[in-house]
């Protein structure tokens, strides 16, 4: 089942499966911004990542001397959420633990994903994680929205660029296979817009460390006729990704509160690099917004 939000400018569709954003269209022009989930390239639109971001070493981790198995990006994206609140411009989706989730994630939790049209062209997205357990829980959470590139006919992938503000030198993390290698950390100068070139994604995503600092990420065509601006409030990382070797007509901008395992991870969940720890009855909130032009 899908849920529709709209205002005078844009129409938004969200699936209850994964609380996944599947469509954002300009109501006047009919322009679709979101990736169409063509399985020949990547069969998702904008999955929500929980309770891990990226891949665990060997797809496994340990908690209290027991080993659990979990695939890349966790299980939330493949589970039905409950729609618990809804207006014409607001929807709140909820996922809670079950016996099935306990077999791979032995914690009691509540994950809310909130969508809100905040003005004529902006969609806010908020993650609220609540610890409903009697002890600490450990988790990561993040977004993975994909946007069509190019957005219109007679344009090319390489006509587009990514610009990150504020302009400064960011720390860039690098992957070896699916895992982070902190010994390969380098820098990224955002004062130079990142022109889209497929070879830049040969080693997977471009990952920048934000350390909770707010940034704006613009994906647009040269000449700035149309595009998307992602405003990230407090994330630890942002990833920029398109699948290498497929000529895929989309790019993902990914705000993350967490990251993949490191190459030397010991597999113990509370030792995991970038993991969040939440005390009983406490909540964690992370948010970003998307402005469409």
Image (cartoon, helix red, strand yellow):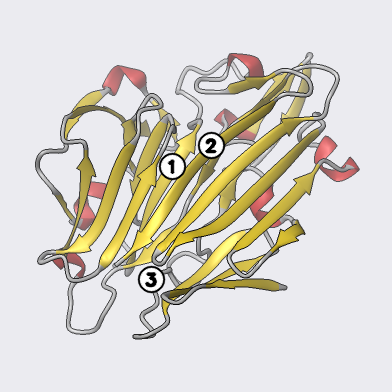
The x, y position of residue 170, in whole percent, is: 23, 28
What residue is drawn where x is 70% and y is 63%? Answer: 86
Q: CA distance from mark 1 to mark 2?
A: 9 Å
Asked if disc 1 and disc 2 are in contact, CB closer than 8 Å, the reply is: yes
What residue is drawn where x is 84% and y is 36%? Answer: 102
- Give the number of the mark in front: 1 or 2: 2
Q: Is residue 244 left or right of residue 57?
A: left
In the image, 168 versus 144, the foreground residue is: 168
Any mark on residue 33, and which?
Answer: 3
Task: Check the image and report above or below for 200 versus 129.
Answer: below
Any mark on residue 286, and which?
Answer: 2
Q: Mark 1 highlights which residue?
A: 255
Task: Locate the C terminus by quadrant.
Answer: bottom left
Badge 1 or badge 2: first in the primary sequence:
1
Q: How many residues crowd mark 2 within 10 Å: few (<14), some (14–19), many (20+)?
A: many
The x, y position of residue 251, in whole percent, is: 34, 59
Give SS at disc 3: loop
Badge 1 or badge 3: first in the primary sequence:
3
Task: Check the image and report above or below for 130 versus 37.
Answer: above
What residue is drawn where x is 64% and y is 42%? Answer: 74
Task: Check the image and report above or below for 133 versus 126.
Answer: above
Q: CA distance from mark 2 to mark 3?
A: 23 Å
In the image, 89 versus 217, the foreground residue is: 89
Give SS at disc 1: strand
Give SS at disc 2: strand
Asked if disc 2 and disc 3 are in contact, CB closer than 8 Å, the reply is: no
The x, y position of residue 116, in whole percent, is: 55, 57
What is the quadrant of residue 71 in the picture?
A: top right
- Give the number of the mark in front: 2 or 3: 2
Q: How many residues crowd mark 1 within 10 Å: few (<14), some (14–19), many (20+)?
A: many
Task: Locate the N terminus by quadrant.
Answer: bottom right
The x, y position of residue 51, in whole percent, is: 65, 37
């Amino acid at each position: 089942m899908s849920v529709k939000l709209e205002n005078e400018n844009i129409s938004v569709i969200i699936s209850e499966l994964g609380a996944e954003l599947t469509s954002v269209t300009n109501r006047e022009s009919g322009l679709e911004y979101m990736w169409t989930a063509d399985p020949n390239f990547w069969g998702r639109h904008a999955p929500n990542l929980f309770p891990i971001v990226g891949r665990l070493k060997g797809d496994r981790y340990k908690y209290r001397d027991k080993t659990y198995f979990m695939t890349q990006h966790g299980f939330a994206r493949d589970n039905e959420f409950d729609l618990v609140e809804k207006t014409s411009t607001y929807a709140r989706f909820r996922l809670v633990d079950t016996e099935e989730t306990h077999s791979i994630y032995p914690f009691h939790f509540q994950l809310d994903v909130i969508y809100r049209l905040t003005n004529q062209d902006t969609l806010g997205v908020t993650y609220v994680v609540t610890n409903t357990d009697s002890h600490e829980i450990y988790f990561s959470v993040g977004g993975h929205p994909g946007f069509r590139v190019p957005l219109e006919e007679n344009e090319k992938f390489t006509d587009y660029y990514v610009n990150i503000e504020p302009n400064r030198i960011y720390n860039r993390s690098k992957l070896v296979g699916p895992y982070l290698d902190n010994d390969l950390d380098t820098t990224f100068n955002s004062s130079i817009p990142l022109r889209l070139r497929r070879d830049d994604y040969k080693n997977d995503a471009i990952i920048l460390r934000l350390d909770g600092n707010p940034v704006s990420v613009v994906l647009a065509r040269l000449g700035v006729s149309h595009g998307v601006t992602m405003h990230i409030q407090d994330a630890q990382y942002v990833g920029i990704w398109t699948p290498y070797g497929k000529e895929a007509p989309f790019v993902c901008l990914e705000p993350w509160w967490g990251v993949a395992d490191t190459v030397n991870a010991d597999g113990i969940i509370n030792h995991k690099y970038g993991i969040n720890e939440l005390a009983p009855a406490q909540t964690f909130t992370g948010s970003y917004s998307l402005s469409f032009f």
